[in-house]
Amino acid sequence: MGHLATGKLCLMTETPITRAAAATPPTVARKIKGLSDRAIAWTFVGPTIFLLLAINIFPLIWTINLSFTNFRANRLNREVEYVGFRNYERILTDSDIWLNMQATAHFLFWTIVLQVLIGFTLAYLINKKFKGNDLWTTIIVLPMMLSPAVVGNFWKFLYQPQIGLFNYIVAFFTGKDPSSFEMLGSVDLAPWSIVIVDTWMWTPFVMLICLAGLRSIPDYIYEAAEVDRASKLRQFFTITIPMILPFLMLAVLFRGIENFKMFDLVVQLTGGGPGSTTELTSINLKREAFEKWRTGYASAYAIILFVTVFGLASIYVKALNKVKER
Amino acid sequence: MKHSKLASVSALSLVVASMGASAQAEDLTLCWAAWDPANALVELSKEFEAQSGHTMSFEFIPWPNFADRMLNELNSGGKLCDLLIGDSQWIGGGAENGHYVKLNDFFDAEGISMGDFADATVYAYSTWPKGTPNYYALPAMGDANGWFYRKDWFERDDIKAAFQEATGRELAEPKTQKELLEIAQFFQEREIDGQTVYGAAIFTERGSEGITMGVTGALYPWGFKYENTPGSYDMEGAVNSPEAVEALEFYKEFYETATPPGYTNSYMGESLDAFKSGQVAMAMNWFAFFPGLYADPNTGGDKIDFFVNPPQNQAGSTLGGQGISVVAYSDKQDAALEYIKWFADPAVQQKWWDLGGYSAHKAVLESPTFKDSAPFAGDFIEAMGAVQDFWQEPAYAELLLAMQKRIHDYVVADQGTAKEALDKLIEDWTETFEDEGKL
């Protein structure tokens, strides 16, 4: 009886901590015996914090410092001068940079709108149980598995005015001559051409997030609505949309951040042209930093973009949390 | 015992000999752009390997990434390249930033005279500050922007008659820029052998240097100058002179009325493709490609001929080409200098030309047989007599990118006027020179 009681006590008091303590070799145990819980916690998180500081925080502080100088990374022997806010002033008063911002905003807005609309629609359709459902899901997600460089080159051929399939398809439906318009070469069409390609590539990503959201809605809610004789349309607007909204907002956040720093795909497609029509801020920033080597100026530019993204993302995350709390 | 002693001595000798050889023999890496002449240089360098005992490795970068990749390498003090055949515009940065080894003492010690090389190439590829006897490279590859055309089409009676009827003159190689445009417009969207063909392939590329190299092919013949007085950085009235405005408008008209559809971002590769596929009647490109074009089984031989960039107010061609430099960060500078010495030899230079490289050595260029040695040899000599180069300042990349943007915005994106584009270009360049402390 006494033995049984002790065994029960052991079972009741054994926790992961006590198990870890029992498994710790005596030599190590002696060493850490004198350390407080806080010290042990710091011992574990210290390396991570050190890496975070070294890889993220230090470069950020260094970039802020450089943004007030005329430093050029290709002229290490040149004297570095502090120029105050001159770099910031030059960037914010440069009309060309505002055009880049406009191009970025156009790209960002339309890619998100189209990807959310198409992605959600696809997810809604895929969520219906039908034959070949899995196969279609696999086919739809293929574009996002490709390298942006491959996609860029691939679409360049599709957009080719003389032999490109895209022009022929448009010509088939509109009756236009295929070589009468240039998707990548026209000032009016080039901004749309990059939106189309990004939408083609990344809509599956939004679709997957929406699909996860749709599948997380319990069936009993719809069953209850059926009992209450709610129409399909009403179920859609009062159950599906509110319950999937946090997922949609998450998809918008991911795609927004990704597309704000879009570089590879657009460089492959248009190189920022024609002229500077599709020169997004990240392309312009790369040119300033690593082609013109205006490191100080480019640092100020990067800080402005960082503050913009960080600010917008913070506001957005707050809104997202509110939606989730509802 | 006697035998074993002998064997030991022999083995020791072999070890010592091999140690000696490995101390001297180096593996040199030569960096250049990936194009036809680079293959010729690989072939040529086999002779150097046999003579010197050194081995050669090559790092050839595609043209669109060449400047980016190599300038990053130099700026980071990289040791990838022992020898670099760098673009002429890099010479200022190479010299001022200490990337290139100054070669004056070496040339003096080895008896290599810059007087043996074509003056224009020495000025453009070797000297910094410009025109001073401070040498940072040996002229390696003379080059200029020229033209080639479908000779078989130009000789066809039906096409000649149609041209005569359309323009009132005979179809022949153009003697002026305006004639060039007229011919290109004549061929634009013409049906030849059941295929729609276009006027000409010109440079319109945005990302690296393409459109600048193309448009200067029009600007220089119109009399474009970078400064009113050389070295003054006084650009107002020079860069945006009425002649420059007219030349820029001309290039835009050329782009709009005489190039294939979708030709908005095209450079060397696209020009070659357009010509070889029978899409265009004429094309601009660097002389470096001409041997390959002439040898092409489909559009070369009797079907092709070449001409120098036509003059307008004056003769003028855009300079290409490069000098070969020893990289200051290399640990194998002695072996690299050996390569330069070997390469400067007139016999090697002759072989260089024979293989498809463009020698800048006078012994080759002034040889009585040179002009007849290839169908484009005479044009090459003529072009090199009137070449102009872009800024060669240490801030060249910044100056180039500004021009790429302003010209592409105007010519391809149709924004603003030619005068406005050139005015903005002066503003950009002024800002750069102010940052550089030169204004």
Image (cartoon, coloured by chain):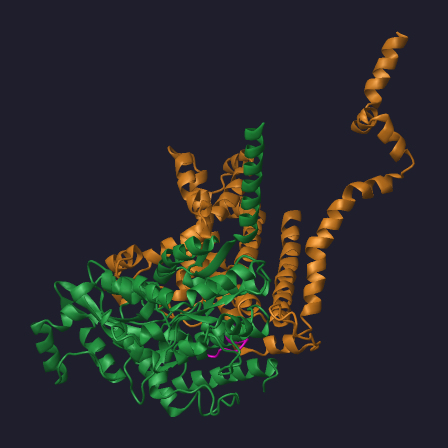
Chain colours: A orange, B green
- Residue A203 lies in magenta, yes or no? no
Q: Quadrant of the C terminus of chain B?
A: bottom right
Q: Residue at x 37, y 53 (%)?
A: A154
Q: Quadrant of residue B316?
A: bottom left
Please state the horizontal and vertical placement of residue A296, each as a whole percent of the image: 64, 71
Main secondary structure found in the magenta portion = loop
Q: Residue at x 36, y 84 (%)?
A: B220
Left or right of A71? Residue A132 is: left
Please state the horizontal and vertical placement of residue B331, each as a whole percent of the image: 59, 58
Q: Quadrant of residue B370?
A: bottom left
Q: Nearer the viewer, residue A6 or B231?
A: B231
Left or right of B311? Residue A252 is: right
Please state the horizontal and vertical placement of residue B164, each as a whole percent of the image: 11, 81
* Vertical position of residue B277 compared to residue A321: above or below: below
Q: Residue at x 64, y 66 (%)?
A: A303
Q: In the rendered picture of this protein, how many numbered marks are placed on residues?
A: 0
Q: Is residue B69 visible?
A: no
Which portion, as a residue range, is magenta? B390-397
Q: Residue furthest front?
A: B2
Please state the horizontal and vertical placement of residue B192, each as a whole percent of the image: 14, 66
Q: Quadrant of residue A79?
A: bottom right
Q: Residue furthest top?
A: A1
- Residue B392 lies in magenta, yes or no? yes
Q: Nearer the viewer, residue A10 or B176?
A: B176
Left or right of B253? Residue A265 is: right
Left or right of B78? Residue B251 is: left
Q: Residue at x 22, y 70 (%)?
A: B375
Q: Nearer the viewer, residue A53 or A197?
A: A53
Q: Is residue B115 visible?
A: yes
